[in-house]
Amino acid sequence: MTFSDQSSDEFSAFALRLADAARGQTLSRFRKGAAIFNKAGPWFDPVTDADREAERVQRDMIAKVYPTHGVVGEEFGVTNPDAEICWVLDPVDGTRAFVCGVPSWTTLIALEHQKTPMLGLIDQPYVDERWLSAGGRTTYMRAGETSACSTSGVTELEKARISTTDPRPIAYFNDKEAEAFAEVSKASRVARFSMDAYAYGLLAIGEIDLVIEAGLQHHDYAALSPVVTGAGGVMTNWSGEAVGSDERGETVAAATPELLQAALKILSGS
């Protein structure tokens, strides 16, 4: 199967429907005392009924419309693992933000063809912001208006606005990674934290220049690469290789190749 403009339009429209369906489950629970569960034992890794019900609704829709497609979801694992076309779902990326009432959590949806990302969607329901990348182009949607996305064009680290979710070594970074990020942060213009995938959407519209993460899983980053690259940015792991090719789930998203290389030079210790 090849991805024509027609199939790209069809899947884009369906991805928007999936995002709308997730909104129906998440918005009704946000800042309204959603039930919180810990799925990681001694280490707090929260999940809420919003996460679970949003993914459940999305999976039901995919099964009805595209029963031969695969699904990878944060909450309910893998369905049809050998499928040529696969949807990757993270119903609430940033559950910690969700349970704290902070509107930086997002719903992530990706479509992969033979494990290659073809479509990515980042949706922030509460502030009604949405980024959709398909056919190599990313668009930004808010309040019924749509515009093309473009990164900032910043090439120098000392002029960069950078972000990571949590810079502490007790969170997503190990000690070495935390030290490396601190060096990048020290060289940058300003750093902001705790935005999860929302930061990648801001990068796509030129408001953030560099996002550095570690400890990510497939469902965390699958939607992000298309959004970043479709806006003119670049995204790799900390060694400059394809995202997902390392065991640590390291990612670097940058507005320009020059900025990426400046960050990688520090992160790789070269």
Image: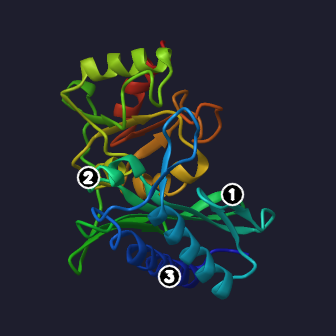
Secondary structure type for disc 2:
loop
Q: Which residue is mark 1?
A: 115
Q: Quick check: 34 above or below 46?
A: below
Q: Which residue is mark 2?
A: 102
Residue highlighted by disc 3 = 9
**Disc sitting over residue 237 in the figure:** none
Label 2, residues with CA under 10 Å away: few <14, some 14-19, many ≥20? some
Looking at the image, tell me whether mark 2 or mark 1 is earlier in sequence order.
2
2 vs 1, front mark = 2
Q: Residues within 10 Å of mark 3 (few under 14, many from 20)?
A: some
Label whose residue precedes the other's in the sequence (3 or 2): 3
The structure residue drawn at horizontal position 47% and vertical position 20%, both measured from the top left corner, is: 177
Q: Residue at x 25, y 19 (%)?
A: 187
The nearer-to-camera label among 3 and 2 is: 2
Residue at the image point whose x is 29% and y is 23% from the top: 185
Amino acid identity at mark 1 = Lys
Residue 209 image position (x, y, % from top left): 28, 40
Q: Label 1's element?
A: loop
Q: Is residue 234 visible?
A: yes
